[in-house]
Image (tube, rainbow, N blue to C red):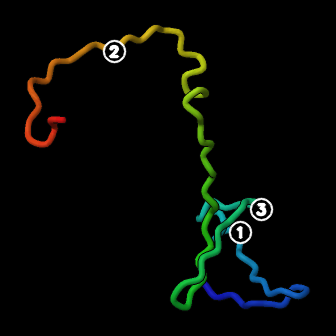
Amino acid sequence: MMAKIQKWGNSQGIRIPKQLLAIASIKEDDEVELIAEYGKIIIRRARKKEKKYTIQELFADYKAEYTPDEEEWGPPVGREEW
């Protein structure tokens, strides 16, 4: 499919056909990522940023008590010995 770069104000733009956007699962007002490499421009849907949770947020609703069990792994081997 061919398209033409056109002047829009102080910038240049390209019109992307609706069918092409549908195939790429991109709709009006979606954020996209533009990547220029080796003589081509790649337009792809922007990845949603995942929220980073703190350990307190992850365990906020955790009610059970936890007591770690001691495990016997045998005597130290090699450089494990202090």
Q: Which mark is residue 68?
A: 2
Residue at the (56%, 86%) spot, across then down: 40
> Under tag 3, what secondary structure?
loop
Residue at the (20%, 18%) spot, across then down: 71
For marks 1 and 3, the one nearer the N-term is 1
Q: Amino acid at mark 1?
A: Lys
Name above or below for residue 78 compared with residue 62: below
Q: Which mark is residue 18?
A: 1
| Camera-side mark, 1 or 2 | 2
| Camera-side mark, 3 or 2 | 2
Q: Calculate the distance from the C-alpha at mark 1 to the C-alpha at mark 2.
A: 58 Å
Q: Horizontal and vertical percent for residue 70?
A: 25, 15
Name above or below for residue 29 compared with residue 11: above
Relative to 2, 62 lies left or right: left
Name above or below for residue 47 compared with residue 9: above
For marks 1 and 2, the one nearer the N-term is 1
Q: Nearer the viewer, residue 23 or 56?
A: 56
Residue 6 sits in quarter: bottom right
Q: Nearer the viewer, residue 77 or 30?
A: 77
Q: Horizontal and vertical percent for residue 12?
A: 80, 87
For marks 3 and 2, the one nearer the N-term is 3
